[in-house]
Image (spheres, rainbow, N blue to C red):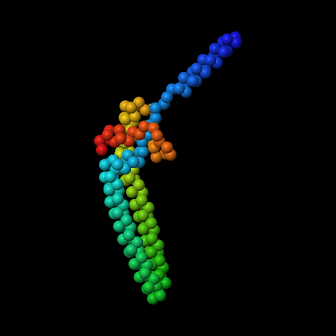
Amino acid sequence: MKQIKTLLIAAVMMLGAGTMNAQVKTAHIDVQELLSKMPEMTSAKAQLEKLNKTFETEYSTMVTEYQTKMKKYESEAETATKEMNETRAKEMQDMGQRIQQYRDNAQKQLQDKETEIVKPIMDKAKAAIVKVAKAKGYQYVMDASAFIVADGPNLYEDVKKELKF
């Protein structure tokens, strides 16, 4: 009985040691750097900047119109009737709400467009990383931007070649 117990303990220790000795191959890559250098991302950024500029221009025009009307109404307030001032105050409040709604809607549209444009680029980068990692026998690839020290293999150049840029 004592021999079986000793044999069982030895077997468990050997299995544990064998598991600990099994090496897991890991590598790293700075995904943000990769994405920022992809030609598709440059094009995507240009599209987003153009859309943002359009929204900013329209927003600026609306705010200028609001400010101009506000100054006009304030300068005429003393000579206008109470009903006229109340109507103008309501008009300015409505105009302010429309400006706020436009800004909120523009931000949402910009975020939606960014997701629409960037997701396929990110998917392409991920597919290339997976392909290179499997070809080189890596079980795990970590994002290097999350590490303070990343001395292991860097897949950046290999993935860059895979993506042909």
Between 111 and 45, the one lying in front of the other is: 45
- For the residue pair 155 and 151, the one nearer the viewer reads as 151
Residue at horizontal 39 percent and vertical 32 percent from the top: 136
**Going 44% across and 40% down the picture, which residue do you hit?**
28
Quadrant in the rendering for residue 143: top left
Query: Most extreme residue toward the left, as rendered?
Result: 164
User: In x, y percent, where is residue 118?
Assistant: 37, 49
x, y (%) of residue 3?
A: 67, 11
Q: Give the farthest residue toward the bottom.
A: 79
Rendering quarter of residue 54? bottom left
Residue 117 drawn above or below residue 61: above
The quadrant of the image that shows the N terminus is top right
**For the point 31% across and 52% down, which residue is it?**
43
Could you tell whether 68 is left or right of 148 in the image? left
Left or right position of 158 against 149:
left
Residue 48 to residue 151: above or below: below
